[in-house]
Amino acid sequence: MSLSRDSVVFLYSDHWRKNISVLAKSHRVYSIDLIGYGYSDKPNPREFGVNSFYTFETWATQLNEFCMDVVKDEAFFICNSIGGLVGLQAAVIEPQICKGIVLLNISLRMLHIKKQPWYGRPFIRSFQNLLRNTAVGKFFYRNVATPQSVRSILCQCYHDTSQVTEELVQKILLPGLEPGAADVFLEFICYSEGPLPEELIPRVKCPVLVAWGDKDPWEPIELGRAYGNFGSVEDFIVLPGVGHCPQDEAPHLVNPLVESFVARHASARAGASSKTI
């Protein structure tokens, strides 16, 4: 089968292993680890002084440059959780690159400083400083970065816990044991600024599809439904009996959604181009 000209980019490579091979039958498929995560380089955030390096702007720029330098074409961005913020930010910065975005259980960013009461913000800042700048943070990370903890966390966010296999645990855990991973992790969990999804979605020019596992304990679907009201969102799809990571827990539901979304908007763009000619 010849490959279509449409390119699909997944964020965080190993977590999409059940989707890549399926979509690669008809598309050019790429998956990348954002800098600081997976097996990408992990620069020490302290080297950047007061300016934070691990931001959505940094990751969005990386995604756009990847498309320009490697994909060498426009692309569809398929994103889960916090990756959805990256995809949206990239589409806002360079709207000519992104053909469309699929958001799976995008992070609501409930710990964002804007969503905290004013009287609690000093406490949050103090706690972040404690994690970043004392041994407490490293102690916390050592207790999280174990097979038992990773399995426990995954069993919280997957509704079908039979999908939490030893392979999955290792794929999530091993990158976190690389040098520098602890510093990146602590930097990010203390990142309570930057954009919110409700600020970015209205600014994107490409079509957006939002799908949500209705058993997600971290990002409640009741709050996520509001994203279906934005004009750029063509549909809000409920994935029944699925938790926070639908692409891995229920690929049989996610892969057809991505296929139809890409086909629909690839053909729409092709039709528009032919009319222009």
Image (tube, rainbow, N blue to C red):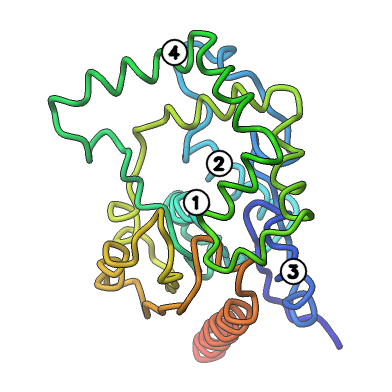
Which residue does the numbered mark 4 point to in the structure image? 50
Q: Amino acid at mark 2?
A: Trp
53 with respect to 20 (left or right): left
The numbered mark, 4 or 3, whose residue comes first in the sequence reads: 3
Q: Amino acid at mark 4?
A: Val
Give the spatial CA distance, label 4 vs label 3.
38 Å
Numbered label tally? 4
Residues packed near mark 4 inside 10 Å, few (<14), some (14 to 19) or many (20 plus): few
Which residue does the numbered mark 2 point to in the structure image? 59
Q: Amino acid at mark 1?
A: Ala
Of residues 80 and 62, the one drawn nearer to the viewer in this rendering: 80
Give the spatial CA distance, label 2 vs label 1.
8 Å
Secondary structure under badge 2? helix
Give the residue drawn at x 80%, y 81%.
25
Give the residue drawn at x 65%, y 51%.
12
Residue 90 spot, x, y in % from top left: 49, 51
Which residue does the numbered mark 3 point to in the structure image? 20
The numbered mark, 1 or 3, whose residue comes first in the sequence reads: 3
Secondary structure under badge 4? loop
Secondary structure under badge 3? helix
The numbered mark, 2 or 1, whose residue comes first in the sequence reads: 2
Residue 141 in which image quadrant: top right
> Label 1 near label 2: C-beta < 8 Å?
yes
